[in-house]
Amino acid sequence: MNRPNGKPPENPTENPQQRVQIETQGDHSDDRPHAIVTGGAGFLGSHIVDALLDDGYRVTSLDNFSSGRPENHAHIETARFESVRHDVTESFPDFDRVDQIYSFASHASPIDFRANAIDIALTNSVGTNHALQTARTHDATIVLASTSEVYGEPEIHPQREEYRGRVNPRGVRAPYDESKRLAEALVSAYHRQHDVDARTVRIFNTYGPRMRRNDGRVIPNFVDQALSGEDLTVYGDGSQTRSFCYVSDLVSGIRALAEAPRERAAGAVVNLGSREEVTIWELAETILAALDTRAGISYQELPEDDPSRRRPDLTRAETMLDWTPSIDLETGIRYTVDSFRQQDELRQVPSGDV
Ligand SMILES: NC(=O)c1ccc[n+]([C@@H]2O[C@H](COP(=O)([O-])OP(=O)(O)OC[C@H]3O[C@@H](n4cnc5c(N)ncnc54)[C@H](O)[C@@H]3O)[C@@H](O)[C@H]2O)c1
């Protein structure tokens, strides 16, 4: 499969009956297992699409392209893939067969928590309900993308799955944090009430190629600023910590969770992330070193409810999935910087020469 970014697909065809727009039409003729990825045009969703295609699945991406991009699929050449423009707050289109669903639609950047607060709350609640209804109809395995944000400002460190969290239900992050908590509650309810094979992954900060440069999350922010020769903006004094996981590690963990036997994994919730905890200040230094730039660091006020510490306890992922992340921060940052530079080069090529 050829993976560089390229042109978006042309001439999408409308299908008003299903209220969906097919961006690229897949081949439904073979008997392979079929997976649906909601948010499949986004950062994580598009990498999951690639992993599923590599593993022989037919794959449908459902995405409203609010933060996802058609170019995240431009490298896909197989007819086993189709992209459908669809908002998950609407009922899902009909499918003749569904084996797995990855419920990944949702803005995930703190800059969207204010501007798209209501969309986020509805996507994670109503959208997850629609995904669960489809999973129930087809007796499919569903994996919900939950988040370390369900732990809020944690009182225990590192965070274990049993920890119930400390979230401000009225804060600016609440539409995201609380709707993910509701999504988890819905997943548990469908599992208990209807025996749906539903699994939840709590994702800790993940980064890598295909993040948008203006995404607003800290790694693309820093890399973008450093590549532009600007100072890196650190919020607060930079002593807050995060654990950053490289995208290929995360995706292998998600696939391991989805493929784990039903008797072991149905109803399970698993943390996935990196145990390499760094301060935001150390992250800035790592990125400045990777780019060998003269840019410095500037400081701004810390946003409301910004958690001070984050690190996953990964014992469950290790024992249940035999999974452990393998890419260290310096290496992952190098891959990410290279991919951002490649995007810049592609943008600079005159369109006639592409
Ligand atoms: N990347 C991380 O570090 C991280 C951490 C924790 C949880 N997550 C979760 O993983 C999922 C994917 O995050 P990401 O980092 O790839 O973000 P992203 O913004 O790149 O991807 C989200 C995708 O969802 C789509 N989308 C949003 N609302 C939709 C709707 N109503 N209907 C259909 N599509 C919709 C967007 O267009 C986009 O393609 C999200 O659910 C997020 O909460 C990500």
Image (tube, rainbow, N blue to C red):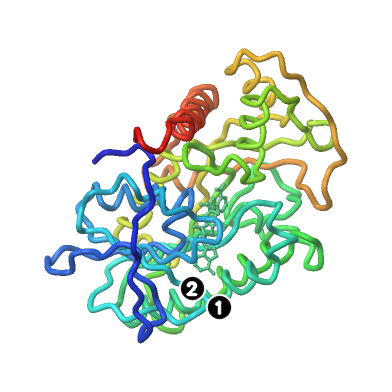
Q: Nearer the viewer, mark 1 or mark 2?
A: 2
Q: CA distance from mark 1 to mark 2?
A: 8 Å
In this view of the protein, which residue sits in the foreground, 137 or 312? 137
Q: Amino acid at mark 1?
A: Val
Residue 74 against residue 30 in the figure, above or below: above
User: Label 2 belongs to which residue?
Assistant: 88
Q: 82 or 16, which is in the foreground?
A: 16
On whether ligand 1 comes within 8 Å of the CB at mark 2, the answer is yes
Residue at 51% x, 73% y: name it: 128
Which class describes the residues within 10 Å of circle 2: few (<14), some (14-19), or many (20+)?
many
User: Residue 310's spot in the image, x, y percent?
Assistant: 67, 42
Residue 26 visible in the shown view: yes
x%, y% of residue 52?
Answer: 29, 52
Q: Amino acid at mark 2?
A: Val
- Give the residue drawn at x 23%, y 49%: 77
- Figure quadrant of the C terminus: top left
* Residue 144, numbered circle: none
- Looking at the image, the residue that sits furthest to the left is 30
What is the number of the mark on residue 126? 1
